[in-house]
Image (cartoon, helix red, strand yellow):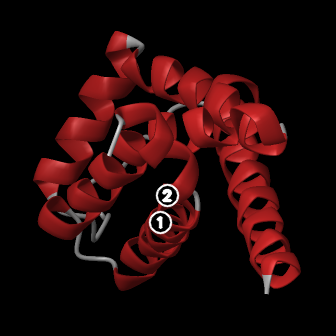
Amino acid sequence: MKTTKNLVIWGICIGLATFFIYKGINKHWLNPCKVYGPESTVPAEYTSLITSMCKSGFLKMIGLLQVVSGILLLIPRTRMIGAILLLPIIFNIFMIHAFLDNRLDELVESGIPLLGNIILIVLLYPKWKSIIGK
């Protein structure tokens, strides 16, 4: 039972870490900011938000936090900190897609990591329970 739980935790951690390290590096060096043309089917509110976040450098900060939390997820001793650091980032990305974006694929792409992170935090409950004293 404990071995299966550890394998599930490792699988989720490797999946989340790989995804968010790639996405974070992608925001910094691989791709420039997205520019949506007038023919785009993406809602104007979403394009305006992404453009503003891109021009202000906010997306680069988010990318850095994604890389840091991904690395923390790979180290067993810091796994819980990485999952907790990543939760508000994933949650906000998911909510932006849920409320401002009409593309189902983007909602699924952000929903699966959110679900994985929630499952990881639940599986790590015994560790964070001892920290908060419950």
Q: Say if residue 108 shows up in the picture.
A: yes
Vertical position of residue 33 compared to residue 13: above or below: above
Q: Position of residue 37 (x, y in %)?
A: 34, 51
On residue 85, the disc is: none
Amino acid type shown at disc 1: Val
Callout 2 environment at 10 Å: few (<14), some (14 to 19), or many (20+)?
few
Q: Nearer the viewer, residue 107 or 65?
A: 65
In what element is the residue under mark 1?
Answer: helix
Residue matched to label 2: 125
Q: Which residue is mark 1?
A: 122
Residue 121 located left or right of residue 111? right
Q: Are marks 1 and 2 in contact (CB under 8 Å)?
A: yes
Residue 96 at x, y percent in the picture: 23, 54
> Dot 2: what SS?
helix
Q: Nearer the viewer, residue 93 or 68?
A: 68
Going 81% across and 69% down the picture, which residue do you hit?
6
